[in-house]
Image (cartoon, rainbow, N blue to C red):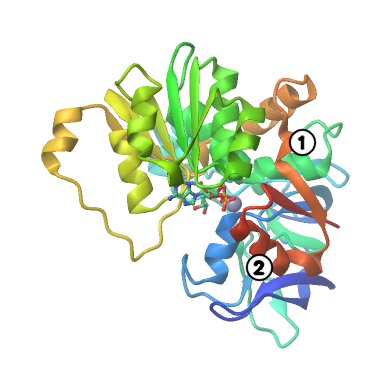
Amino acid sequence: MSQQVRGVVSLAKGAPVSIETITVPDPGPGEAVVKVQACGVCHTDLHYREGGINDDYPFLLGHEAAGIVESVGEGVTDVAPGDFVILNWRAVCGSCRACLRGRPHLCFNTHNAQQKMTLQDGTELSPALGIGAFIEKTLVAAGQCTKVDPAVKPEVAGLLGCGVMAGLGAALNTGNVGRDDTVAVIGCGGVGNAAIAGARLAGAKTIIAVDLDDQKLEWAREFGATHTVNSRSGDPVKAVQELTGGFGADLVVDAVGRPETWKTAFYARDLAGTVVLVGVPDPSMQLEVPLIDVFGRGGSLKSSWYGDCLPSRDFPTMVDLHLQGRLPLEKFVSETIGLEDVEASFAKMKTGEVLRSVVLL
Ligand SMILES: NC(=O)c1ccc[n+]([C@@H]2O[C@H](COP(=O)([O-])OP(=O)(O)OC[C@H]3O[C@@H](n4cnc5c(N)ncnc54)[C@H](O)[C@@H]3O)[C@@H](O)[C@H]2O)c1
Ligand SMILES: [Zn+2]
Ligand SMILES: [Zn+2]
């Protein structure tokens, strides 16, 4: 048995996305079918459409989602039909070298569904980040479903499934920001503003938002930025130094992922501080930095995959903090849209008029 549902597919590099009829198999052993309620549009979906991730077209886009488990396959005990879940792309295996060393947040062998969702002609789809959630129902590995308090709105909860968790975790987990720290965040889209919210949650004393867009900077203030810098109007490195006693910030998060923003992050950081790269670079990008500067400035240069989150630990906590009024996740939702509006939402992402467009189903 299988079901036919509508989903948003990127058929060819650079081409506009289209709505296709997709066959979703019944869940096999270890799998679950989830009725998607909401799915945010992340910049990574656009990276897929533009060929910036790999060439395994056609892609079933969407991966920041929440919904209700409809059915589960053999052997699934952690979730059951009716559970409200956030989908994650880190279903830890428990047996790879990272998991065995007690670092499941780095799991190198995460689980996805074994079976494939297909187009009507049988072509297998590559689901974005192993999820694929701009679709009425999706097939995932049961471990990709994380149960959270159903009191949270789906359009808010879903965002924790990728970008918002990546940003929160870039500050809290990878950056290990603490009380009294100075923090700068380059790029204040959904990911960067989540890093700002994370820095505030952890008690950072100075939080500097850097972007090219004044609207994004205005939103950054609502998430906790104490200062904003528009890098169109001057050197952002100098601006961050001036706001931190001439030294630079203890932690700088690059939530754009370009050589020039990484260099800004590197030079805007205080000696022995931390740079966290959470933005995803294009495979063609190269970095050139004097090695003596890397040595001479000390500290650590890190990348943050998915905010080093452990979904089973972090999703319920972030939802609870939100429900307590301590994490304004609802502010990330700029608009709710339909499946047919995904292409238009990419354009809005480029012009900067939205933080997150969220598809409601
Ligand atoms: N590491 C992860 O696990 C992970 C997870 C989700 C998303 N991402 C990546 O994070 C990045 C940000 O995602 P998003 O959804 O927030 O994107 P977005 O497009 O909403 O935001 C990007 C922001 O960066 C700003 N910007 C662009 N160039 C800049 C520059 N030179 N200087 C300063 N600001 C600049 C833009 O104005 C915009 O506000 C993307 O590369 C995305 O793929 C990474
Ligand atoms: Zn593992
Ligand atoms: Zn994403």
Task: Say which amino acid is labelled 2.
Answer: Gln
The residue positioned 47% from the left and 65% from the top of the image is 53
- Frontmost of labels 1 and 2 is 1
Q: Is disc 2 surrounded by few (<14), some (14 to 19) or many (20+) residues within 10 Å?
A: some
Position of 257 with respect to 120 (left or right) is left
Position of 262 with respect to 351 (left or right) is left
Helix, strand or loop at mark 1: helix
Reply above or below: 107 against 206: below
- Say whether mark 2 is within 8 Å of ligand 2: no
Task: Name the disc covering residue 115, or none.
Answer: 2
Residue furthest to the left: 292
The residue positioned 71% from the left and 20% from the top of the image is 326
Position of 140 with respect to 2 (left or right) is left
Task: Name the disc covering residue 353, or none.
Answer: none
First reached walking from the N terminus: tag 1 or tag 2: 2
Viewer-nearest residue: 332 or 245? 245
In contact (CB < 8 Å): disc 1 and disc 2: no
Viewer-nearest residue: 269 or 74? 269
Viewer can see residue 77: no
Residue furthest to the bottom: 121
The residue positioned 26% from the left and 27% from the top of the image is 299
Q: Within the image, what quadrant is residue 267 found in?
A: top left
The residue positioned 49% from the left and 72% from the top of the image is 51
User: Mark 1 = which residue?
Assistant: 330
Helix, strand or loop at mark 2: loop
Q: Is disc 1 surrounded by few (<14), some (14 to 19) or many (20+) residues within 10 Å?
A: some
Viewer can see residue 143: yes
Which quarter of the figure is the C terminus placed in? Answer: bottom right
Position of 152 with respect to 178 (left or right) is right
Which quarter of the figure is the N terminus placed in? Answer: bottom right
Which x, y percent locates residue 2?
82, 72
Task: Say which amino acid is labelled 1.
Answer: Glu
